[in-house]
Image (spheres, rainbow, N blue to C red):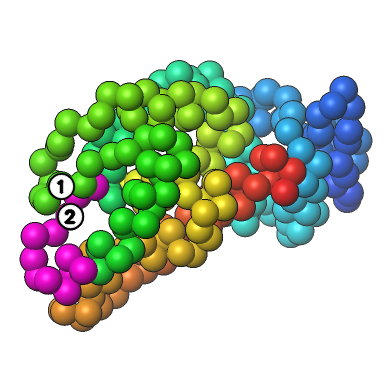
Amino acid sequence: MSEWSVRRFWTKAEVVEGDGAFSVSLDGHPVRTPFKSALTLPSRAMAEAIAEEWAAQGEKIDPLSMPVTRSANSAIDKVAPQQAEVVAMLAAYAETDLLCHRAGSPEALVARQIAGWDPILDWAARHFQGPLIATEGVLPVDQPPASLQVYSELVGSINPFSLTAFHDLVTLSGSLLLALAVTEDRITAEEAWLLSRIDELWQVEQWGEDDEATRFAAQKEQAFRHAARFWRLSDGS
């Protein structure tokens, strides 16, 4: 991250619109990605969020305080050049989706998974015509090929900026279906995160909290919420 280790050299960050796209300039000079690509953005909302991050910087640039900028950089420098590979990796989550792998006991945890996860499985089966099979344990189960094809095509239709957000929604939750439920406004990011944590929260209830695990979970939740926001910014919401 040495490219970020510079002091503030601008006074004004502005949104620039042209040819149906948006960018950000610093005192008239366009912002570029770490790989020196043009930071061409899909929506004014995203450009405004990035301009706000640059405007809020102090004497020295702090990349951790610029999550939208970092995600936009990733979309351009990392996701777009290998979009097919990212799509294949994310679509494969349908084969082992978190919501499909259930506990056999205790009954209270089984009931909690049923109450939380079955409505999302049922919704996805109806909404996308892509039913998936729930099973007990962690071993993979053969999912319907037609459903796997449906989800592969869905993920393949996502543009690089939205795909950057979708990547984090899927990998942080362990569930393609939860990510789709968030992006389709079936549930909120907050609800999705809690559903992804049913097993972990059960363990906390039984054995108490571990400080390090709690901090790590909080960091992941923050990243998950940011991914949901970046998804909305990608389409101008």
The one of 67 and 169 positioned closer to us in this rendering:
169
Q: Residue at x 45, y 36 (%)?
A: 128
Q: Quadrant of residue 207?
A: bottom left
Residue indicated by mark 2: 102
Q: Is residue 129 left or right of residue 28?
A: left
Of marks 1 and 2, which one's residue comes earlier in the chain? Answer: 2
Assign a secondary structure to mark 2: strand
Task: Give percent across and percent down for residue 206.
Answer: 16, 79
Query: Eyeballing the image, is 159 above or below 117?
Result: above
Q: Report, in whole angstroms, how far the alpha carbon at label 1 lies from the one at label 2.
A: 6 Å
Q: Which residues are magenta?
A: 100-111
Q: Residue at x 63, y 37 (%)?
A: 72
Q: Is residue 116 left or right of residue 231?
A: left
Callout 2 amino acid: Arg
Task: Give percent across and percent down for residue 196.
Answer: 34, 58
Q: Residue at x 55, y 46 (%)?
A: 184
Q: Residues within 10 Å of mark 1 (few under 14, many from 20)?
A: some
Task: Give percent across and percent down for residue 199.
Answer: 23, 64
Q: Mark 1 and 2 residues: CB-CB less than 8 Å, in contact?
A: yes
> Is residue 101 one of those drawn in magenta?
yes
Residue 154 makes an appearance in the image = yes
Residue indicated by mark 1: 135
Assign a secondary structure to mark 1: strand
Callout 1 amino acid: Thr
Query: Eyeballing the image, is 59 above or below 208?
Result: above
Q: Quadrant of residue 146?
A: top left
Query: Eyeballing the image, is 25 above or below 210?
Result: above
